[in-house]
Amino acid sequence: MAKSRYIGEYPVIGIRPIIDGRRGPMKLRESLEDQTMELALAAKKLFEENLYYSNGEPVKVVIADTSIGRVPEAAACADKFKREGVDITLSVTPCWCYGSETMDMDPNTIKGVWGFN
């Protein structure tokens, strides 16, 4: 009998730290960068400490390299997640930024949003 009855790779969770992309005199984006990445790290920790694959290993969680406030950042995140085998995404944010340029638009991923406004 095989060690695992699961066929294929286990799903990977991707954390997408999304942010209001407006820069300028108000420094809106700049004021939220640290808080946004802290949310992403907190979600990663929560998942890794509480979710396990059927073989007992903790789930694999990947975080985008930067916060996502514009289309190029979303595209870079999507590219990284594709390479890492991400099947499930959680977008985290401390602010209103749910435009299509920041959200996960991949029709093949399971999505969640943890946000505050």
Image (spheres, grey):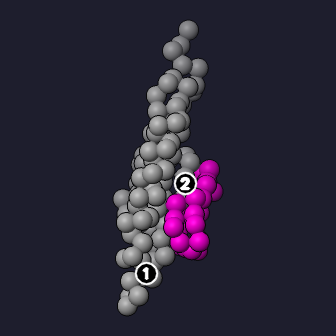
The residue tagged 2 is: 90
Q: Return the x and y of residue 66 as percentages of the image width and height.
A: 37, 63
Q: Residue furthest bottom?
A: 25
Give the residue displayed 45% in from the left and 51% down from the top. 42
Give the residue displayed 56% in from the left and 48% down from the top. 88
Q: Return the x and y of residue 7 as percentages of the image width and height.
A: 57, 27
Q: Which type of secondary structure does the marked residue at label 1 adopt?
A: helix
Going by the numbered disc 1, the residue's amino acid type is Leu
The residue tagged 1 is: 28
Question: Magenta segment range?
Answer: 92-117
Give the residue displayed 46% in from the left and 58% down from the top. 39
Quadrant in the picture for the C terminus: bottom right
Q: Which type of secondary structure does the marked residue at label 2 adopt?
A: strand
**Label annotation for residue 19:** none
> Is 100 part of what is drawn in magenta?
yes
Sequence-first disc among 1 and 2: 1
Going by the numbered disc 2, the residue's amino acid type is Leu
Give the residue displayed 44% in from the left and 45% down from the top. 45
Camera-nearest residue between 31 and 97: 31
Q: Mark 2, residues whose alpha carbon is within 10 Å: few (<14), some, or many (≥20)?
A: many
Q: Are marks 1 and 2 in contact (CB under 8 Å)?
A: no
> With respect to residue 116, does 85 lie above or below?
above
Camera-nearest residue between 13 and 5: 13
> With respect to residue 33, does 77 lie above or below?
above
